[in-house]
Image (spheres, grey):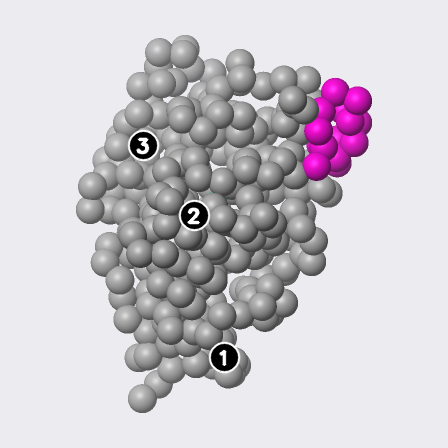
Amino acid sequence: MTEATSCTAMPPFGVEADPELILKPSEGGTRELRRLFDEEGLLVFKGLEPMSMAQQMDVCRLFGPVLDNPWENMIVSNSRPDGYLGAQQLLWHNDLPYLPRPYIGGSLHALEVGAGTTSTHFASGLRAWERLPAELQDRIAGLNALHVKQKVFDRRNRLTDLEPGDVCAVHAVVRRQRNTGRPYLFVCEDLTDCIIGLSPTESDALLAELFSYLYAPGETYEHRWDVGDLVIWDNETVQHARGEVTEAVRTLQRVSIAEWGYAQMYPTDLGIYSDQYDITLAHGTGMAGVRAS
Ligand SMILES: [Fe+2]
């Protein structure tokens, strides 16, 4: 049996991979994992013993650089005092599209999971682009979109939500996957304000059309958490979302794969507005730059 055969496809996309491939990394196994990461954008490992943050960082280093700091690596929890992101829903998003270099990848490892806790959903920008009609592919080629910092959680964030010190970034609507050159859609429900150069009405209509392909029923993967699960995804081609977190305990350990960290790309968030804003990571939101109450 080859290492490749120990991985099974998960409909509609993603792969459940053999935990041995990360517990006892080999050259061939790691090559296969990287190939699957590029091809599918989503890897799931089940049945792992709880890992430390350092162990999870080592696993993520099989796929790319990992920065050892609390901006990229944290506890996501609705119960632990050191946990971030509270209980609010998170609409579909890539992490940090409002900065010049969104994270390469993300990972979540389940440490505590109560019965019926909230699942995490994933959608593929690669698959969405492939399903677009040719005329729509042609129409969006060369267009750019404006992405804004997260300020609200119950609807799409807009440029008009931003406050002094907040940032936004422009990225191509169709980007190319870093290792393969494959085109993928890079607009998201949560953080894309508009497509540049179109009227507001045209922009909203085009975004709604693109979202209908990205988040089409049957085209997204829902991960229901068990303790020990590790999910690793390509943050550039794959988006994630979650509903409002139920009361059941939910503690996930988050590690990012990134060449550039949040503090490197957005140093002004860490001090220049300190007279006006609470610059610490605000517990319960996970967001920096939240106005002090
Ligand atoms: Fe996220």
Q: Position of residue 247 (x, y in %)?
A: 37, 45
Q: State which mark lies toward you, 1 or 3.
A: 1
Total labels drawn: 3
In the image shown, does 186 or 264 lie closer to the viewer? Answer: 264
Residue at the image position 44 percent from the left and 39 percent from the top: 87
Q: Which residue is mark 1?
A: 23
Q: Residue at x 75, y 31 (%)?
A: 268
Q: Quadrant of the C terminus?
A: top right
Around disc 3, counting alpha carbons within 10 Å, would you say few (fewer than 14), some (14 to 19), or many (20 or more)? some
Q: Tell me where residue 62 appears, x and y as whole percent.
A: 55, 69
Q: Where residue 286 appears, x then y in whole percent?
A: 57, 39
Q: Earlier in the sequence, mark 1 or mark 2?
A: 1
Badge nearest the viewer, 1 or 2: 1
**For this rendering, which residue is in front, 202 or 55?**
55
Q: Is mark 1 within 8 Å of ligand 1?
A: no
Q: Is residue 24 left or right of residue 200?
A: right
The image quadrant that residue 216 belongs to is: top left
The quadrant the N terminus occupies is bottom left
Magenta stretch holds residue 229: no
CA distance separating discs 2 and 3: 14 Å
232 is higher (above) or lower (below) than 123: below
> What residue did someone put label 2 on?
237
Specify start and end residues of the magenta stretch as a single range. 267-280
Residue 143 can be seen in this image: no
Q: Which residue is mark 3?
A: 211
Mark toward the start of the polypeptide (2 vs 3): 3
Q: Amino acid at mark 2?
A: Thr
Spatial CA span between label 1 and label 2: 26 Å
Q: Is 279 placed above or below 83 here?
A: above
Residue 207: where, in percent of width, then height? 35, 25
Mark 1 in CB contact with mark 2 (< 8 angstroms): no
